[in-house]
Every structure is written in structure tokens, then in C-alpha cells.
Amino acid sequence: MSPQRRRTMSRRIPLMTAGIFASAVIAAGSVSAAPAETPAPVPVGKPAPTTAPAPSPTPTGGVTDAPAGTSAFPAFGAYLDYGPRGVQSMGRLSKWLGGSELRVGHTYLPGDRWSNIEGAPGFLEDWAQWRRERDDRLFVLNVPMLERNEERVSDTEVRSLLAQGAAGDFDEHFRRLAQRLVDLKVPDTVLVPGWEMNGTTYTHRCGPDPEAWKTYWKRIVTTMRSVPGQKFRFDFTPTRGLDAVPWTKCYPGDDVVDVIGMDSYDQPEGKSFSEQVSEPYGLQEHVDFAKAHNKAISYPEWGLFRNGDNPEYVRRMIGWIDRYKPLYNTITDYCPHGVWQCDDNPQSSLVYRSMLSGRLAPSVPSVPSVPKPTQPTQPTQPTQPTTPPVTPPVTPPDCAPLSLGDWVEYWLGGKLCLRFDWWSRRS
């Protein structure tokens, strides 16, 4: 889903009186959910959601069924902004989460013109520097497969462009991108070409010609792998559900896919998380498909959407991630999807913060090798998802409970928690 089409302005209401402040604190469960600043506008061709890889779920890159609650937490991060501001915001988000380590940096190349898809100078340097600072970090880069990627190009023209790509007409653009990433010393970047290809938003969609799309994907991967020094991993990421076409029809093959991802937002309106799991081409089918192909899974984009502030969705999505141990996951953190940079979802923010606070990187080898393609195995029968335990909210830092008496606290529904660092969150 395109962030440009999902994005709304963050509404920040000035603090006028102590009474308004108290009401806001109570409504938010005594935890503030806003970060230091709102994200900058998204560039054309980049989704509102995405530098070197973190440990694979298994030595071969396959999916595991490890239960939630183990110490090896999946690598996670958040899409905060596409440029340097996104890099700078990760430290503040980590602090908000009690020091949790954000090991995933996620951004998108603009898809307006080929020069930007090639990774124009000035765009990737900050992300590359962030990635190089620690070996256990993972850099995820979404790559448009065609220019004019969000200009609502007709199916007829898309079909023609996919045929050109399949014939090799655009190989040089991806060779230049690969060389640029190697030159920046981030040769192990996880690349997500043509994300959400099963929908209708992007020019790089699969629907008009699935066979040409798959051939074009193979050319992109082959071209980028031909650059000396590269260690790229390629992530095939549809959007959850059927959408315009079944995403399985777009799968280009085990030899050119290292990770099978899924963008999964809380939609459509009224659909429960259990239904998101069991629907055709939903979360369970994604896990089963990846397991059958012995591939790691990922969730490059997830977050709130059509059902508003939905803490149950956040609780169960994090539980699902903890259970199936994806290579990485990144929540889309701006309104209406987010929990830190969006004031509209205070209850979901409370759940996200309480469940992810204090998570540190596991002490395992930091940079795994690229998993080799394996022969597919028979898919397992879908299993019913388990509901993760409800984690009690944590007392936010620099926050002191006020004693207002039993009668007042009875009508308030709890104690009032007063933050003493409120001024620093807007700086």
C-alpha cells in the first residue's frame, strides 16, 4: 500500500490548561505516544513504509515455530521517514522503548524517475553509515521496478513496460544501484523489489502480465548478483490477502528469492485478526508457503488502518511475530498506522510500548550468509493462531503517580500519572 495514499496529517492540539493535560494523560493510559517530531513528506514512488542483515530464523533461512517469550527476539524497527530524519529518529524511538535495540533500518527509493531508482547520490549515505556502525544491523531497501511508479499508469502500458523489463531493457539501472550499494559498503542489504505487486497501486504491479513480471524480477536479481562484492538478499513481499491477483501467481521462483515477506495492515474495516490469519492468501498461508519453500519470512510493513486505535490488533500482531520469528519486521509509524509518531492511537501505543520495551539483540552470529535455494517441501496444514498473553502496561519513565484520594481515583478509573519530561518530547 502506498504511504502517500494512506498518509494523513498528524494533528497536535496545543496544551491549553492543566485540565486538558490531565484528560489527555488519562485517555492515553498515562503513556504519551508522540515522538519528537512528525515525519517529512514522502517522496514520489516511495511507500510510507523502509542496512545489513540480522540473524536468519534458522541456519537455512527457513521459518521456525519457536514459541513467544524466548530470549531471541526477532529483529525489529520502524519506518519513521525516508531520509536522514528517519535515521536520526531511531535513537529517540529506542529511548521511548526503554532502550530496546532497533536493529532494522527501512527506507524506500523514490520511484519517480530512473536516476532515483539507481540510488541517486545524497540519498543512501546516512542509511549506509547507520548500518556500518554495528554488525548486527539490517538495512532494508524497497526498490521500485519501474519509474513513474505511482502515476496510475494504465494496464496496457504496464504490460508493455514489463515486457521491456523482461527483455533486459532496464538492466543497467539495477546494475548501477547494486554497484552504488557495494561502494557504500552495504553489500548485504535486503532488497524488496516490486513490493505489493499483487495490488493495483504501483506501476510495478504483477496483474497485467504475471509471466513477464516474474521474468523481469529474475533479470533484476541476476543483474544485481553479477556485481562483484554483493551479498544481497531479495525479499518478495505482496500485500496480505487476495487483492487484485493471488500473490502466489507472481512468485518468481526459489532461485531468485531469499525471503518471503508480507505487508499486513489492520484492514478492511471490521475484519478481526483471526480472520486476517485464516483468509485466503492471509497470514497463515504466508507462513505455510514460506515454510514449503524453505524461506525466511518478513513483515516490512504492518500497522493500524481501517479499524482505528485497535490495541488488540497490535497485541496479536506482535504475538504472531514473536511466534514465527521473521527475519525482520518494521511497523509503519505515521498516522493513521503508527504508535509513536501518531497521537491518534494512544491505546495501541500503550500496548506496543509495553510489549517491546527493553528488548535487546540476541547474542548470536550477527551477519549470516545468504541462504542457498532449496527444493520445496510439502506445506504444513494451517494451524489456529494462538493469542499471546496480555502484557501489563509499564510505568513510563520520568512519570510519577499522583495520590488524589480513593473517591477521585474511583471516578477517574485509576491513578493519574504526571510526566516530568513532557517538554523534551517536542524538541
Image: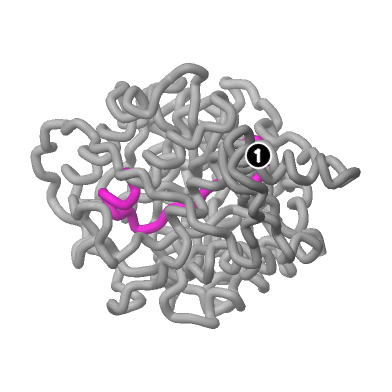
Residue drawn at point x = 46 percent, y = 40 percent: 314
Query: What residue is rendered at 54% in x and 58% in y?
Result: 395
Query: Given the current orientation, which residue lies at the most extreme right position?
Result: 16
Q: Nearer the viewer, residue 365 or 319?
A: 319
Q: Quadrant of the N terminus?
A: top right
Counting the numbered discs, the total is 1
Q: Is residue 330 magenta-colored?
A: yes
Asked whether, in this view, residue 72 is left or right of residue 14, the answer is left
Q: Nearer the viewer, residue 71 or 130?
A: 71
Residue 115 image point, x, y percent: 70, 56
Residue 18 picture location, percent across and down = 84, 47
Q: How is the image coloured?
A: one colour
* Residue 370, quarter of the rendered image: bottom left
Q: Does 67 appear in magenta?
A: no
Q: Secondary structure at mark 1?
A: helix
Q: Residue at x 58, y 77 (%)?
A: 184
Image vertical order of residue 59 relative to residue 8, above or below:
below
Task: Specify whether 171 is left or right of 125.
Answer: left
Residue at label 1? 408
Answer whether residue 137 is visible to the viewer in this image. Answer: yes
Q: Position of residue 251 (x, y in %)?
A: 33, 38
Answer above or below: position of 75 versus 185.
above
Quadrant of residue 228 in the image? Answer: bottom left
What quarter of the picture does the C terminus occupy? bottom right
Query: Which segment did they paint magenta?
Result: 320-336
Residue farthest top in this picture = 270
Q: Is residue 150 something that shows in the picture?
A: no
Q: Residue at x 78, y 37 (%)?
A: 9
Q: Amino acid at mark 1?
A: Val
The image shows residue 333 at horizontal and vertical percentages of: 61, 48
- Please tell me which residue lies in front, 240 or 386: 386
